[in-house]
Amino acid sequence: MPHQVFARVLSNDPIIAGHQVITCEAPTLAAEAQPGHFVNVLTAERYDPLLRKPFSVYTVDRDRGQISLLYSIVGATTASMSRKRPGEMLDMVGPLGGRIFQADTRPDTTHIMVGGGYGVPPLVFLSRELRLAQSAPNIKFIIGARRKDLLLCEAELVAAGVDARVATEDGSHGTSGRVTDVLEPLLLENSGLPVAVYCCGPTPMMKAVAELCLKLGVTCQLSVEVAMPCGIGVCMGCVLDLTDGRRVRCCVDGPVFEAGEVKW
Amino acid sequence: MTNINTAVKIGKLTLRNPIVTGSGTFGFGPEMANIVDLNKLGAVVVKSTSREPRLGNPTPRIVETPSGILNAIGLQNSGVDNFIAEKLPFLRNYDVPIIVNLVGTEVADYVHLAEKLTAAGGVHGLEINISCPNVSHGCDFAVDPALTAELIREVRKVTDLTLITKLSPNVTDMVPIARAAVDAGSDALSLINTLIGTAIDVRKRKFRLANITGGLSGPAVKPIALRCVWQVHRALPNVPLIGMGGIMSATDAIEFLLAGATAIAIGTATFVNPTASTDIAAGLEAYLIENGIADVNELIGAVTQ
């Protein structure tokens, strides 16, 4: 159930250029948040910027009651967040999101995570939850970035024993090209076997991944990113047109949709 | 001190406190019922309802501007029949007046809506939206006292529910329109609707809203809204006003009461703080207790120079 939390910041450290991980003490959020959920953060004290900004949940530590967000410093809210020191408070509303990632339950499923940019963190969360729920889930993780120095979470995935593959647009690390250049051969290799794709990233990337999965008949869940002014389903600002003709709210009717549902 | 009175009257309605929700910022109730106890509100004003379902405008529909937002939703809703069948049964479970915001393009649309909602049972008031800035003809009524009077007169004939006319600030003088609405049978007035504005992306050299213009709300409009409430209250001191426009805190709400509002609608604030409406209701009560004010009605119009 969404609620407002003033959470004590425990740490807030850079990971790569322009990206930080903020960890807060928020036991209720840590208990309730699942992969695909997001929280809305407010940093302005005098209404400018007025609206909260959404952040997908990166990790939770339920035992310690902690929640972490991995964010890219791009605007006023994230700039303010980046200046938060341990001991200061972060104003969050969450967990938000009506329809979130659903782990495929078919036996022996290969779970393929496809993440680009700050679409990677919620999939890291999903991978962690899969590993908690199953003894040895078969997870393949594809991380996309423009350049090597913009890659997120590769080292931690490798350290956790996850098969992590990389695509960089300039070829500075891993496969030279886009995530679909790694995904397509992987899907063909697993043709006929149970495979589920989970994707989060920039819209052009998600569109390409969705089209590839539809072409090859693979189920694909996408966490769609559009501007979500309220996050609680009442402002009607984040609407999305679906292929069945419905116009739905991304925040509470999503943000996770099946590949075939979204009208790009 | 528990013997303070927070109740106010709007037409036939008694509100347990002056805090109501702003239409279009609180859904139809169910969206918010997990977050806010509806029974702690003075009234719930639900989203605009039209005769036929409306898909609304293309996106982007909301953009941020300094201390405000511009919206051009375009009255997306599932239509009055869906409201009565799907939303109203839920709302009937609550002990709070339900006010439905009506929107149409012709007098006949409003009359049809008023008849249906009056017959449905469980609706306590009708807010007549003559001032939506985001649809064609949406403002025609609101800028013309004669058209406003004709509309309210016709709606008045078909309903005994409390009628509230929502006024536009996008006029030279709101007072003649306010007076026309009241003379035609409106029990109360809501003000203000949003102010028409726009914003441009200089890098793309394009308008930021797909609809080009939108309605400005949020703290940026509060001084204008407060001035409008004061002007209309001064001209029509016996007409209950629901004041709205950028109210973010109990202090803001008290300003509107002092300017002459009987009730206060919380709109954009709910987008920022989902519990803003009940937080402000609690803050207002705390203010009354702290200041030894026995009745919230003592504050209404009590501003002095």
Image: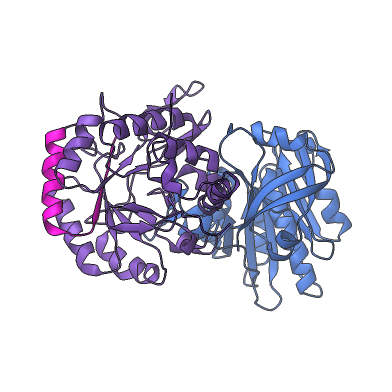
Say which residue appears at 55% left-offset and 45% top-offset. B272
Q: How many marks?
A: 0
Considering depth in this image, is B124 or A162 the residue closer to the camera? B124
Say which residue appears at 57% left-offset and 65% top-offset. A218
Say which residue appears at 45% left-offset and 21% top-offset. B205
Q: Position of residue A128 (x, y in %)?
A: 78, 63
Q: Position of residue A73 (x, y in %)?
A: 71, 34
Q: Quadrant of residue A87?
A: top right
Chain drawn blue in the picture: A
Residue positioned most to the bottom: A107
Quadrant of the frame with the N terminus of chain A: bottom right
Chain drawn purple in the picture: B
In the picture, measured across the screen, residue B154 lies left or right of residue A29, that is left
Q: Is residue B41 above or below residue B214?
A: below
Part of the protein shown in magenta = B145-169
Considering depth in this image, is A88 or B198 the residue closer to the camera? A88
In the picture, measured across the screen, residue A11 lies left or right of residue B28, that is right
Is residue B271 at all visible to an observer of this figure? yes
Q: Is residue B82 above or below residue B282?
A: below
Residue B153 is one of the magenta-drawn residues: yes
Q: Position of residue A108 (x, y in %)?
A: 71, 76
Considering depth in this image, is A164 or B96 the residue closer to the camera? B96
Considering depth in this image, is B58 or A137 the residue closer to the camera? B58
Q: Position of residue B175 (x, y in %)?
A: 24, 30
Tell me which colouring the rendered structure shows: by chain
Is residue B140 at all visible to an observer of this figure? no
In the picture, measured across the screen, residue B96 lies left or right of residue A37, that is left
Residue A218 is one of the magenta-drawn residues: no
Say which residue appears at 58% left-offset and 33% top-offset. A49
